[in-house]
Amino acid sequence: MISEIQERIDARGLVCPMPTLRLGQAIRRVAVGEVVELCSDDPGAENNMAAWERNTGHELLWHGIEGGVHTFHFRRLH
Amino acid sequence: MSETSKPRRIALVASKGSLDMAYPPLILATTAASMGWEAGIFFTFYGLDIIHKERQKTLAVSPVGNPAMPPPVPGVPLRVPNLLGMLPGMTAVATVMMKGWMERANMAPLGELLQIARDLNVRLFACNTTLAVMGVKPEDLMDGVEFAGSPAFLDYAAEANVQLFI
């Protein structure tokens, strides 16, 4: 887990595709090099975010699960 | 995705204008665009209603001929028989039910998904043959829509990694 997070998205209670869309909107708002945090309790979150990382080229810095809630930290790379 | 490679592309055909069939193309296109793909939807035949300024507000779902429609009363395993589903008002009831499920699941309403699609530069192609066949005027459609026929769409789809007819 890292501390310098520019934007946090609380997507708990949202189903696909909303967490992905909210993350996509947030990553466009921060500058290259900055970090967005996404919290999601979507059971597909882990697979979805792995696909998102592969497809967007942004960097997944950290992923944790607590009480069924996934937290992801993505750094905008381009 | 490497920085130098061409972005992936998805080309979708939205051919149906019922509420349940309006969601899949918009979900896939917005997700793809959110992942950095190029995304385009070709709205044809009844699918044109999805981008029709007025008709998009009244998209509906019918229980008739839909054996997957869940029972209207939770906990009572009685589905709506086709014969009853044909009664006046049943389509409205089914539509309200479906909008209720969407709301409970925090799914964005159709209008919001369309706005997100526009924000993400999803290309919305209106089939101009359908406009002629259905008597729809270009000004009846949402802003930001492009007009295209099958040659233009095929050309777009030929360069796509994923092509789906919905």
Image (cartoon, rainbow, N blue to C red):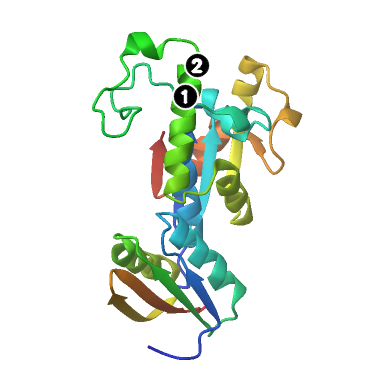
Disc 1 marks a residue whose amino acid type is Val
Q: CA distance from mark 2 to mark 1?
A: 6 Å
Q: In the rendered view of the protein, which quadrant contains the N terminus of chain B?
A: bottom left
How busy is the neighbourhood of tag 2: few (under 14 within 10 Å), some, or many (20 plus)? few
Contact (Cβ within 8 Å) of mark 2 with mark 1: yes
Disc 2 marks a residue whose amino acid type is Gly
Please tell me how many numbered marks the rendered image carries: 2
The image shows residue B32, relative to residue B158, as above or below, that is below
Q: Residue furthest right?
A: B139
Q: In the rendered view of the protein, which quadrant contains the C terminus of chain B?
A: top left
Q: Nearer the viewer, residue B92 or A9?
A: B92
Residue B127 shown left or right of residue A11 in the figure: right
Q: Quadrant of residue A52?
A: bottom left
Judging from the image, what secondary structure is the residue with disc 1 in? Answer: helix
Q: Which residue is mark 1?
A: B93
Q: Which residue is mark 2?
A: B89
Q: Residue at x 48, y 28 (%)?
A: B95
The image shows residue B19, relative to residue B89, as above or below, that is below
The image shows residue B145, relative to residue A75, as above or below, that is above
Q: Where is residue B94? Give x, y as percent.
A: 44, 26
Judging from the image, what secondary structure is the residue with disc 2 in? Answer: loop
Disc assigned to residue B8: none
Q: Nearer the viewer, residue B29 or B68?
A: B68
Q: Quadrant of residue B81?
A: top left
